[in-house]
Amino acid sequence: MKRHPALAHLSREHHGALILARLLQEDAPGYKGLPTDTNGKVTYALNFYHSELIKHFKEEEEVLNLVIGINAKLDSLVETIFSEHKDLHILFRALNNPLIENLYIDKLGKKLEAHIRKEERELFPLIQENCSDEMMAEIDKSLTSHL
């Protein structure tokens, strides 16, 4: 399904986050210009989190608050996404503790990848299928105010 223009901005931002997600996983291939050692990956992850993901999660949550109440399946998925955002925040913050960063780095990479895939494959199509043109315009307006 082609991504609706109102959601395209969020979808494009997922590319960098997917690269980060793969980079953090134990079986990650080398990415040109990105760190290969654990400390470098942690530093990169925390910088990306603070400069990109916190804002991205906030924008997504603003959009999701707009679509609550449209249908039960969407409401359930929105609740799951909110919960996953909280879990991801916790895992990113755990990277600040050098004693446990190695325990969480692979887990974080896998959770982040699964989360993004869920949004792209389930959430965004469900929003597109269930939201009116007026609602999609409201979503677009909400996201455009952040650019």
Image (cartoon, rainbow, N blue to C red):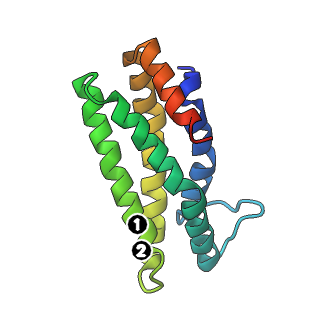
Q: Amino acid at mark 2?
A: Ala
- The answer to the question of whether label 1 and label 2 lie on touching residues, with beta carbons closer than 8 A, is yes
Locate residue 31, reporting x and y percent: 71, 59
Locate residue 1, reporting x and y percent: 53, 20
Question: At 65% from the left edge and 60% from the top edge, which residue is drawn?
Answer: 29
Locate residue 55, reporting x and y percent: 52, 52
The front one of 122 and 31 is 122
In the picture provided, is 93 more to the left or to the right than 24? left
Q: Secondary structure at mark 1?
A: helix
The front one of 123 and 36 is 123
Residue to which mark 2 is pinned: 94
User: Residue lying furthest bottom in this view?
Assistant: 99
In the picture provided, is 137 more to the left or to the right than 41? left
Badge 1 density bin: few <14, some 14–19, many ≥20, Cα 10 Å:
some
Q: Quadrant of residue 36?
A: bottom right
Question: At 34% from the left edge and 57% from the top edge, which residue is drawn?
Answer: 86
User: Residue lying furthest right in this view?
Assistant: 33
Q: Which mark is residue 21?
A: none
Q: Can see residue 144?
A: yes
Q: Secondary structure at mark 2?
A: helix
Q: Amino acid at mark 1?
A: Leu
Question: At 42% from the left edge and 35% from the top edge, which residue is drawn?
Answer: 63
In the picture provided, is 19 more to the left or to the right than 127? right
Q: Quadrant of residue 77?
A: top left
Residue to which mark 1 is pinned: 91
Instruction: Quadrant for the C terminus, please.
Output: top right
